[in-house]
Image: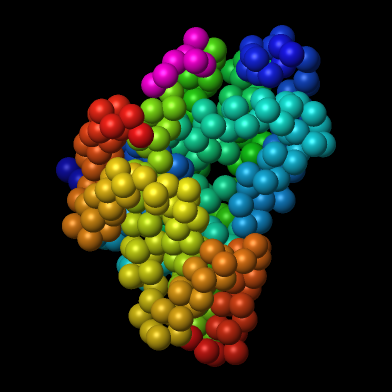
Amino acid sequence: MKPDPLADLALHFVLLSLVAVGGANAVVPEMHRLAVDVKGWMTDREFADLFAIANAAPGPNVLIVSLIGFKLAGVSGGLVAIAAMCGPSSILAYSVTRLWQRFRDAPWRKLVQHALAPITIGLVLSSGWVLANAADVSSTGVALTIGTVVLLTGTKLNPLWSLAIAAGLGLVGIS
Amino acid sequence: MITLDDPLDLPPKPIPLSALFMGFLGIGLRGFGGVLPWARRMIVEERHWLSDAEFTELLSICQILPGPNIANVSVALGARYRGIPGAIACFSGLMTMPLVIVLTLGALYERYGQLPALDPVFHNLGAAAAGLVAATGLKMAAAHWRRPLAVLIAALAFVAVALLQWPLILVVLGLAPLSFILHRQLRQ
């Protein structure tokens, strides 16, 4: 018997929730691997589109998981996906912040911070890489990706400007 | 002052569940292009639920923990004031409106996303969004690139996940203890 895709997705996101050091952006490669390569829920292109929608909308960028769930099973799929992705990490956050007082001065706290930061950085850069591979099929795409990186690392502009410029160019047919 | 010594151990002032929900509802709606700055503004400057030092402390804990940082902040802050109901009020306040908006956009995409006129728009948006994420990673890296060990660990994570496409869960479960042990040995 084929497993229910929504249950399958929930199980994967529950596990992913607990390794998402640095938040949703860090686990994009795994979502992509799962949704596109392993399960074939959507194409590379659709994944890139949904990620762009989640970024253009207000709210935390973890919302990409609700779009993956929505694609699979409509609104209930979206809700299940967000609950699976946030549930375990929220329970952990609830427990740890209650106990934190005890660990406040523990020397390993700084150590954990230092040890995890580079992993998060490596994962977020991997996310950028995976998304660029999915989206950059033309020289305009490559230019927009590089342009966005330059704009955001070099200036204090709101990231929405870069999305607005990209959408504007697309509306007049440049892509 | 006690406030600075024990930021998370103060007797919390009573805040109604509805206020917790509404406060985070506002964050969700304003959070275009990043939610954290708005969260800080509402929690510290507008509603005075936490002092600046308390907020920084809470955020730094939530950044070590897995999961979306802002969701962790909402849960921890709600729990501090009203226990589990408070955590649920803050979290659902944060997520409700963005979920409604993003699922509406998802439905529109499903219906109209294949229109030829929108094709270049989505194509460009995807490319720009990839740049947003890469830029976020580079900005985070700026604070660490002088630490050779950090560069090594970040490079290992990138090679394993982006280039070799190994399962991310296994990579994190392997790299986290390795990074911790190496950092302890080198005391970086």
Q: Position of residue B40 (x, y in %)?
A: 70, 39
Q: Is residue A47 visible?
A: no
Identify the residue shown where x is 33% and y is 63%. Answer: A130
Q: Is residue A84 above or below residue A154?
A: above
Q: Is residue A122 left or right of residue B80?
A: left
In magenta segment, residue A107: yes
Quarter residue A131 falls in: bottom left
Quarter residue A45 falls in: bottom left
How has the structure been colored for display? rainbow
Q: Position of residue B64 (x, y in %)?
A: 45, 32
Q: How many marks overall?
A: 0
For the N terminus of chain B, the image quarter is: top right
Q: Nearer the viewer, residue B148 or A174?
A: B148
Residue stretch in magenta:
A102-108
Q: Is residue B130 visible?
A: yes
In magenta segment, residue A144: no
Q: Nearer the viewer, residue A4 or A60?
A: A60
Q: Is residue A155 above or below residue B138?
A: below
Q: Residue furthest right?
A: B46
Q: Position of residue A138 (x, y in %)?
A: 38, 84
Q: Is residue A124 left or right of residue A56?
A: left
Q: Position of residue B12 (x, y in %)?
A: 73, 14
